[in-house]
Amino acid sequence: MSETTPAPDTRSPGGPEAPTPRKRVNRREQILRTAADVFAARGFNNTSLADIAAMLDITPAGVLHHFGSKTDLLTAVLELRDDSDPAPGGSRMLDHLVTTAERNAARPGTTQLYAVLSAESATDRHPAQEWFRDRYTVLRGEIGDAVLDRLGPEHREAASTPGPDGRTPAGAAAAAVIAVMDGLQVQWLLDPEAVDMASVTALVIDALVARLSQED
Amino acid sequence: MSETTPAPDTRSPGGPEAPTPRKRVNRREQILRTAADVFAARGFNNTSLADIAAMLDITPAGVLHHFGSKTDLLTAVLELRDDSDPAPGGSRMLDHLVTTAERNAARPGTTQLYAVLSAESATDRHPAQEWFRDRYTVLRGEIGDAVLDRLGPEHREAASTPGPDGRTPAGAAAAAVIAVMDGLQVQWLLDPEAVDMASVTALVIDALVARLSQED
DNA sequence: AACCTTACTTAATGTTTATTAAGCAAAGGG
DNA sequence: CCCTTTGCTTAATAAACATTAAGTAAGGTT
């Protein structure tokens, strides 16, 4: 079909002759946000530029006008942090994580994107692999610190002392907290009634903090 | 190129005229295992039949001779349980989970498959969606029972009493354990040095059991 | 009015992909 | 020795997809 078939118009059938509203706002950001939604809902590999373009009522080439390639679009989406609710430092951060889990359950958005894409990035030569590796490293550090902040001063040293494998209990707890949030998202996406992300997250944080506050 | 180019031979260049060793073993199972490995390493959407076929030194059509479609192959792979180490019931199961995490770190296989595919299945109309929904439901039940078994008899009632949302603390703990195992797998795949799946899993199970054994 | 920038479109290209149809060859039973 | 089963192959098809090139059109700027 390569020579004869015209390029399919993937746009939804709008008005008879809707000549593109031509808005004043930053089009790039609009596309970015739409792409984020579609990537979150369908993953990267399972999303075509046509999918994104269709939601914006433009053609795939229209998307590539703003971002050179599909991979560039993905990196731009990942770089776009949702700073509407910035993470605080210190011990307040752990509460913030529970709040985040709550918000995610109400409005499936940012974290859904990360949960789906992070798992996908763990395959083969996924373009987002390095991005997620770095992100997890940073997050483990930050949450590890937050865990230490939550502990009584008398337990901090034990929790931040590396074991024979060079890893600290606080770091292990941080990895656990991140893991539980990511894993819950998957279960929740598959069966929203089955799990309450916020309360389970809170339970795990509570349990871990209590456990690290014990003498053993 | 569709009319002129011959079908590419995706097979690796073996001996000059290797006429297919024609083994006696169940070919279907060989293909199944190979497919499982490739799906685990690259995900479902990112894997082509040619990828799998190449590892078996046959053509994509050769794979489809045994399984009608790529989706059928996936479902067959999921149905193929790794029963080399059957899960015990009762309180022994929790220890078994830690052992499983250990084995997975040593030989990335079955669970890697499930970690990658489960997240992928949470997208759109993925063919494995229902399979994973059911699997999580069953697992939450089994692990929830195992958690109850580990608790002292005096705490069992509280842990199995549904809260106002209809969910039990034991069920929440079960969801958390599953989530942490899945989530850790992703972090570990991206950065094997950064986390010790077995010890973190053990830590979370310990912490949760201890937490459910408290009075609150 | 001339122009530039922004935001696209149409069209074509080349690739990858799953899937189907039909044929071939070896093994083994009867 | 025929026949059926098993296990493929080659070939063709049709669709999906990312990407490129070149053109068009509207606003804003000067």
Image: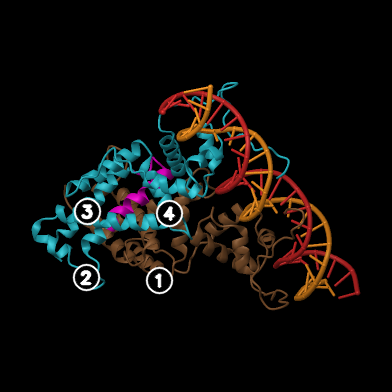
Chain colours: A cyan, B brown, C orange, D red
Q: B82 left or right of B16?
A: left
- Disc 4 is placed on an element classified as loop
- Disc 1 is placed on an element classified as helix
B87 w.r.t. B166: above or below:
below
Chain under numbered label 2: A
How packed mark 3 is, by other alpha carbons closer than 10 Å (few <14, some 14-19, many 20 or more), is many
Q: Which numbered disc covers residue B106?
A: 1
Whichever of labels 2 and 3 marks the residue nearer the N terminus, that label is 2
- Residue A11 rendering spot, x and y as whole percentages: 57, 32
Residue located beneath label 2 in the image: A163
Residue located beneath label 4 in the image: A128
Q: Are marks 2 and 1 in contact (CB under 8 Å)?
A: no
Residue drawn at the location 29% of the way across and 62% of the way down: B200
User: Looking at the picture, which amino acid does disc 4 mark?
Assistant: Ala
| Magenta residue check for A140 | no
- Residue B1 rendering spot, x and y as whole percentages: 72, 54
Q: Which residues are magenta?
A: A175-195
Chain under numbered label 1: B
- In depth, the one of A205 and B170 nearer the eye is A205
User: Looking at the picture, which amino acid does disc 3 mark?
Assistant: Ala
Give the foreground label among 4 and 1: 4
Chain under numbered label 4: A
Chain under numbered label 3: A
How packed mark 4 is, by other alpha carbons closer than 10 Å (few <14, some 14-19, many 20 or more), is some
Residue located beneath label 3 in the image: A207
Task: Give the Cα distance between marks 4 and 1.
Answer: 25 Å
- Disc 3 is placed on an element classified as helix
